[in-house]
Amino acid sequence: MALLLLLLRPILILSLFHFAPIFHSEAALGSVAEEDFSEELLLRPLPDRKVLAHFHFQSRAPHTNSNGRHHHLFPKAISQLVQKFHVKEMELSFTQGRWNYDQWGGFDPLSSSNAKPPGVELWAVFDVPHKQVDDSWKNLTHALSGLFCASINFLESSTAYSAPEWGYRPDSGSLSGLHLTSSEFESEGVGSGIVLEQTLTVVVQPSSQRTVRIYSHETKLQPSWSLTSIFGRKVSGRCVLAKSSIVYLQLDSSLVAELDSLQKENNISSTDKYVSEDFSSNACFEVSVKPDRVLKELKGFEKKNPSVLYEFSIDKYNESGPFDLGLTWTVPVAWSCQKAPLHVSRFLMGSGNERGAIAISLRSTELTNKLLHTDSNEGRCKLEVKVFQVVPWYIKVYFHTLQVFVNEQPQAVSDVVEKMLVSPSVDKVSPGVLEMVLKFPCGMKSAAITLDFDKGFLHIDEYPPDANQGFDIPSAIISFPNFRTSMQFLKDDSSDKSSILSKFEENSAVLAYTEVLLVPLTTPDFSMPYNVITITCTVCALYFGSLLNVLRRRVGEEERLENKEKEPGWLRKLYAKLTGRPLEPVESTSTSSSLSSSKLKFIILVAGIAVFWQVYYG
């Protein structure tokens, strides 16, 4: 994986690791004859002066009935995991940060398949009887926990997972990441083997290679960048084990539209500058390496300005002539990525430690009506939205308090909610699950959904180490079934097509994740046990220290010490001799019996205090 070695010093904004076995039919995938491995990298400039880097690694293994097969390229641990637990589909994601749908877009295959909620998310489909699913899930989580050195085993608890019915279900082939395309458990036909796809998506802030100039309307020049400036090194060639190593540079449709308008303002004709051979003469930007192929989207979201892909093959580069792709902007460009049909956000309402409310806000992104779904039965335009929400058991949601607002006006639930499935939570057993299918009018500007809840109480052993920080409510999943993110760049359907191009062509629904909510619950004072332990140990130390001192001290030694105290010291003798006065004997302040009695009283007093404290405050 030579491309992965580039990640030496990126400024990490969002990190996604996906691991998913996905079933493909043999007709679509083709039979895998032998193991192979390919690596690809997609680079895309973003409107907020950042760069998206999407690494895609794919491994394929043929079908086998033997459990002890030797693998040359395919990870043996993954193959054993699929065979042992009968995994048909799986997706495992590790995410740091959150995808910015406003700045980075929400209407493309990458944002719908690779943008995941913060933390760990695991989806799995098993080819086992229904009664064995829970056991297979627990075994799978423990195996993944050891395989990836992560605390995935905490997902084995029934309070940490749920099984959706119809509100949200991943489309076949749309799960991104480590694609374990497993058809070994199909009863019909010959299995096509396992396809494993591993993806790493990062958003980095490049350091500009030139001074930023300010133009009119305070538009800043986009930072110029290269692989060396972002990752700290050049690509010295493809991996020796990889069948192919390809780097893509993508210009999305919104950027292409903006560049075309700039060219028209500068009296530069021909919008095909991006797909011509002499692309380097473009007046808006310069690419340091000539691409091997330039691909133009065939069925773009906007037919007038389709997306453009520059393809660079790493096969012809080596250590003497490394590959270092760079993009230099010559004019200031400002654009915005294509957003999802509705902008989704989620927040909490209410105050105090007793009750509150969850609100999901939907705002229109001003899509044209022709892109919206028309309900032929009712003869009017409708926008369909699916909501899937999981709530922990200690958040007592009252689903009957569901309220729907459209354009800030309350609406009857039956007018907007087409169908709803509710699974109430059970204390310390299972979380609450809400699945809804909503249909809003196309001309709507904004909508909101609210649900009231009460905050529960936990046992002291159930609080996490950072309980005062709050408790997380997982992200809600919002999908738009009537909108698809398919992008096609090639006319032919060859079996050896690039992995990234194949992912772009998948007809998956637009998907978005909301924010993770942080709910403060009533938390006990965890410092009180420490204070009790500290004062108890102090009292015990004083008590036993004094007791041992009295028991171990001997009477003869005390008398010797008293006699020694009665003897005049040399300073007193010297003073008497100088002044001529006689020595006066030292009077004993106490006897051994009085000393022992006072110490015994002190011990009894300390013991009484300790007993009183233990009875009333322990």
Image (tube, grey):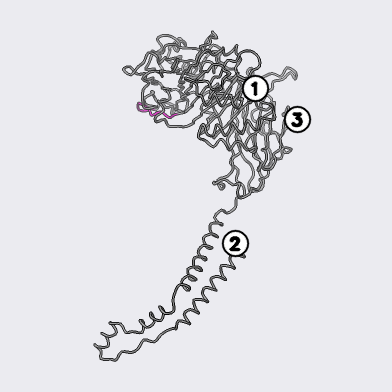
Q: Nearer the viewer, residue 156 or 259?
A: 156
* Placement of the C terminus among the 4 image quadrants: bottom right
Name the residue that disc number 3 marks: 414
Residue 618, label in figure? 2
- Give the percent coordinates (x, y) of residue 286: 39, 17
Q: CA distance from mark 2 to mark 1?
A: 60 Å
Q: Which secondary structure, mark 1?
A: strand
Left or right: residue 116 versus residue 10 is right
Q: Which residues are magenta?
A: 204-213
Q: Amino acid at mark 2?
A: Gly
Left or right: residue 605 versus residue 446 is left
User: Tag 2 or tag 3, which sits nearer the N-term?
Assistant: 3
* Placement of the N terminus among the 4 image quadrants: top left
- The part of the image, by quadrant, that contains residue 222 is top left
Packing grade of label 3 (10 A; few <14, some 14-19, many >=20) is few
- Give the percent coordinates (x, y) of residue 108: 55, 21
Marks 1 and 3: which is nearer the front?
1
- Give the percent coordinates (x, y) of residue 106: 56, 25
User: Tag 1 or tag 2, which sits nearer the N-term?
Assistant: 1
Q: Nearer the viewer, residue 317 or 538?
A: 538
Q: Amino acid at mark 3?
A: Ser
User: Tag 3 or tag 1, which sits nearer the N-term?
Assistant: 3
Residue 89, label in figure? none
- The part of the image, by quadrant, that contains residue 31 is top right
- Give the percent coordinates (x, y) of residue 500: 51, 18
Packing grade of label 2 (10 A; few <14, some 14-19, many >=20) is few
